[in-house]
Image (cartoon, rainbow, N blue to C red):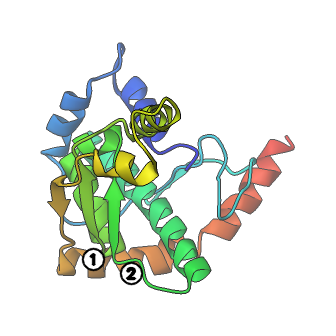
Amino acid sequence: MSASGGSLEWLQRLLDNPPITYQEINDILEGAPQEPTGILYFPYLSGSGSPHTDSLARGAFVGLTKDHTRSDLVKAVLEGTAFEAEFIRQAAEKILGKNIDSITASGGGTRNPRWMQIKADISGCTIEAQAIHEATLLGAALVVGIGIGLYADPQEAISAVQKEPDQVYVPDVSQNKLYRRIYQEGFLPLQSPLRQASHMLSKQ
């Protein structure tokens, strides 16, 4: 995804200067309701990536009212990136020809429990957040370890990595039902008109 964590960092800069911290983001989210915000956020600040690559796509908020608060905007950004992740997950299911019922997550986003729960609620999948947050660096280190003979082969390297998840997030059935409707009747149908508008604006 072109702007997942980037969307949150962008919002952090907008909310205050210097940017508010991740802990402050979590504190703000405490004021957000459990149910969906009613706001659709499209996380295309840097265009959109696979499976609908479009460098001209632009981000957007849809559904704002005077009653929405700062916490609603923060949560809407988390929801929007989770909707985009769901689009990617469904595309992967079509390619694989089978259901994806569980997801292994790593990286900085796993430090935000509310975000992880939203992803679980939207996808309907169980999400296992790994204790090792910097998975990319770990993967590079394991490759080096194999190269210098520290590990005999990839299987030995993998067995040396902690496998137990740090946290497991189970989807809430009632929240999933609400989010599925928003995804099917809002997020997906607005893709085409949003992209058309983005292309038009890019020519101005």
The residue mark sitting in front, 2 or 1, is: 1
Q: Which corner quadrant of the image does residue 126 belong to? A: bottom left
Which residue is painted at 33% across and 54% down in the image? Answer: 105
Q: Which mark is residue 181?
A: 2
Give percent across and percent down for residue 71: 24, 44
Residue at the extreme top of the image, as rendered? 18
Residue at 63%, 67% (x, y): give it. 191
Residue beneath label 1, please? 176
> Closest to the observer: 95 or 70?
95
Q: Secondary structure at mark 1?
A: helix
Secondary structure found at label 2: helix
Left or right placement of residue 82 versus residue 194 in this view: left
Residue 113 position within the rendered picture, expressed as x and y whole percent measured from the top left: 19, 49
Residue closer to the observer: 18 or 66:
18
Amino acid type assigned to the residue bearing label 2 in the image: Arg
In x, y percent, where is residue 180? Answer: 37, 79
